[in-house]
Image: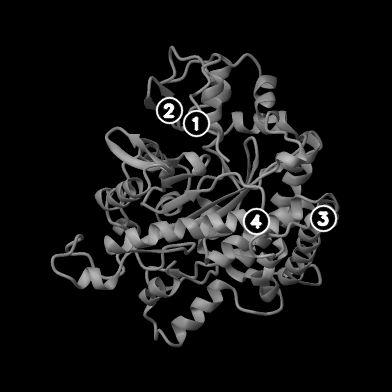
């Protein structure tokens, strides 16, 4: 669910034009789609690290990732070569930094996060069954090629063993700008870039009012998703006192562009109000003639008003500039021409599919959305903001009302179940219904351990404190 095509060079004439840009995402219900994005850490499989000669000499078993620009690039080249009708290369200078789908994979893309975290941005698909098949096909195609290179992939929210200094940097111009800027605006921005992985689902809206309702519901309930999908209890080989250290990192990454923006729950919220918020999010870069210009920290609003700012002299802000700028904000739910749910740690394939099922069930059925809104509006907005700061450590056991977040999660899942049953989409191949993908979550609210709690049990039990065992046990 990307915005393909060349950058729009139309000069920006007014804020309302930018609001209209977002409004172009409004679609009739029959055109609503489900897009998934999932990241995973690469690691050197133990037999590779022990072999001679090793394609990665000197690296210990379970090192990460394909420590390379060259290592991860080899995998991208192998995938593009093995499926030439499906993928074309995406370059940054002379480096392959991703693949763009074509043919049957049109709309999908493979990209690299700052430290080589391997991401599939799925195509916009009609049903959860299609997204499940897409995920499985992706893993089936990558796995044998990675094994030939001695690599494995593990979906965890925060890297369990490596220090920040041990993590590499991918040769992407955007990341070089962020790498320099992040330490100026938060204490954990580089951790976010190098040592976290997430899974998200992207969903459509039918109108501005539909967007508002979906945005408010999903923003408020994002901390509950964080608790359900918590999968990052380790840091540098030891328990880190958090169930989702990825979510904890986001509490001090760059609060001017992340978190739960207050404007979402203000009475005048809509496309234009979101644009106004975005205009005050500090800039990272602009593109001109294929070259990225570093303008980190500059004000888009001041640029639009014609104020002089270093690095922006002689440049006129365009629609394409604002489209790029939209990608540099990281709220827990991000608005583009669709909505991105951004609160979950990366996890097992079953949990990745469960995330898509949860939000699809809540947001794509009118009755379910109304029930979810009633659930949210029963509490002050500030309660959900406070919850966001608590769930990284306490997870589903975080106090909520007269009970815990587990109780709130159970209500969410019940509503999502009703929403998916109302969709009544049965897979032609398996005859399965969409609500089967919620099964891992129903177990969690019934008392089963979260992914993070499962790994902690392994750490204190069978692993005897050896965190590196998590790589092969979580490998996908």
Indicate which label's residue lies in the foreground, 3 or 1.
3
Q: Which residue is mark 1?
A: 283
Q: Nearer the viewer, residue 73 or 270?
A: 73
**Of pointers 3 and 2, the one earlier in the residue sequence:** 2
Asked if residue 274 lies left or right of residue 76, the reply is right
**Of pointers 3 and 1, the one earlier in the residue sequence:** 1
Q: Which residue is mark 2?
A: 295
Q: How far across and how far down the image is residue 282, in percent?
A: 52, 33
Q: Residue placed at 63% from the left, 69% from the top?
A: 395
**Of pointers 4 and 3, the one earlier in the residue sequence:** 4
Residue 97 numbered tag: none
Dot 4: within a 10 Å radius of its alpha carbon, few (fewer than 14), some, or many (20 or more) residues?
Answer: many
Q: Which residue is mark 3?
A: 368
Q: How far across and how far down the image is residue 81, in percent?
A: 31, 46
Q: Residue placed at 77% from the left, 34% from the top?
A: 208
Label 4: state its secondary structure. helix
- Badge 3 vs badge 2, beta-carbon distance below 8 Å: no
Asked if residue 60 lies left or right of residue 387, the reply is left
Indicate which label's residue lies in the foreground, 3 or 2.
3
Quadrant for the N terminus, please.
top right
Label 1: state its secondary structure. loop
Q: Residue furthest front?
A: 429
Q: Residue placed at 43% from the left, 12% from the top?
A: 314
Q: How far across and how far down the image is residue 62, in percent?
A: 31, 69
- Badge 2 vs badge 4, beta-carbon distance below 8 Å: no
Q: How many marks?
A: 4
Distance of label 1 from label 4 (alpha carbons): 35 Å
Q: Nearer the viewer, residue 234 or 86?
A: 86
Q: Which residue is mark 4?
A: 128
Vertical placement of 459 versus 307: above or below? Answer: below
């Amino acid at each position: 669910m990307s915005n393909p095509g060349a950058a729009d060079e139309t000069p920006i004439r007014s804020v309302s034009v930018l609001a209209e840009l977002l409004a172009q995402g409004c679609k009739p219900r029959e055109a609503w789609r489900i897009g998934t994005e999932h990241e995973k850490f690469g690691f050197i499989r133990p037999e590779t690290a022990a072999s001679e000669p090793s394609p990665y000499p000197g690296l210990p078993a379970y090192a990460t990732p394909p420590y390379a620009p060259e290592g991860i690039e080899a995998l991208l080249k192998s995938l593009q070569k093995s499926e030439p009708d499906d993928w074309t290369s995406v370059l940054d200078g002379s480096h392959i930094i991703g693949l763009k789908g074509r043919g049957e994979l049109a709309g999908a893309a493979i990209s690299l996060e700052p430290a080589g975290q391997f991401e599939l941005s799925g195509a916009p698909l009609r049903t959860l069954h299609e997204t499940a098949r897409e995920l499985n096909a992706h893993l089936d195609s990558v796995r044998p090629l990675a094994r030939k290179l001695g690599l494995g992939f593990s979906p965890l929210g925060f890297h369990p063993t490596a220090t920040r200094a041990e993590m590499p940097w991918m040769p992407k111009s955007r990341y070089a700008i962020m790498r320099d800027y992040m330490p100026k605006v938060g204490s954990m921005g580089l951790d976010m870039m190098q040592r976290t992985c997430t899974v998200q689902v992207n969903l459509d809206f039918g109108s501005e009012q539909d967007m508002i309702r979906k945005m408010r519901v999903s923003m408020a309930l994002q901390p509950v998703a964080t608790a359900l999908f918590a999968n990052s209890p380790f840091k540098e080989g030891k328990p880190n006192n958090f169930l989702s250290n990825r979510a904890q990192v986001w509490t001090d990454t760059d609060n001017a562009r992340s978190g739960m923006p207050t404007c979402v729950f203000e009475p005048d919220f809509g496309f234009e109000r979101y644009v106004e918020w975005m205009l005050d999010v500090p800039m990272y870069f602009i593109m001109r003639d294929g070259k990225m210009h570093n303008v980190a920290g500059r004000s888009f609003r001041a640029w639009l008003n014609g104020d002089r700012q270093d690095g922006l002299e002689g440049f006129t802000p365009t629609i394409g500039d604002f489209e790029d700028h939209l990608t540099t904000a990281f709220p827990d739910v991000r608005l583009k021409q669709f909505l991105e749910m951004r609160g979950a740690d990366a996890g097992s394939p079953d949990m990745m599919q469960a995330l898509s099922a949860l939000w699809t069930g809540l947001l794509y059925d009118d009755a379910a959305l109304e029930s979810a809104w009633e659930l949210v509006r029963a509490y002050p907005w500030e309660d959900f903001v406070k919850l966001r700061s608590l769930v990284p450590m306490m997870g589903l056991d975080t106090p909520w009302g007269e009970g815990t977040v587990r109780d709130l999660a159970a209500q969410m899942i019940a509503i999502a179940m009703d929403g998916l049953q109302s969709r009544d989409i049965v897979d032609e191949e398996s005859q399965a219904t969409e609500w089967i993908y919620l099964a891992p979550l129903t177990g969690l609210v019934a008392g089963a351990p979260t992914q993070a709690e499962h790994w902690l049990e392994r750490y204190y039990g069978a692993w005897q404190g050896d965190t590196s065992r998590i790589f092969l046990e979580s490998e996908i």
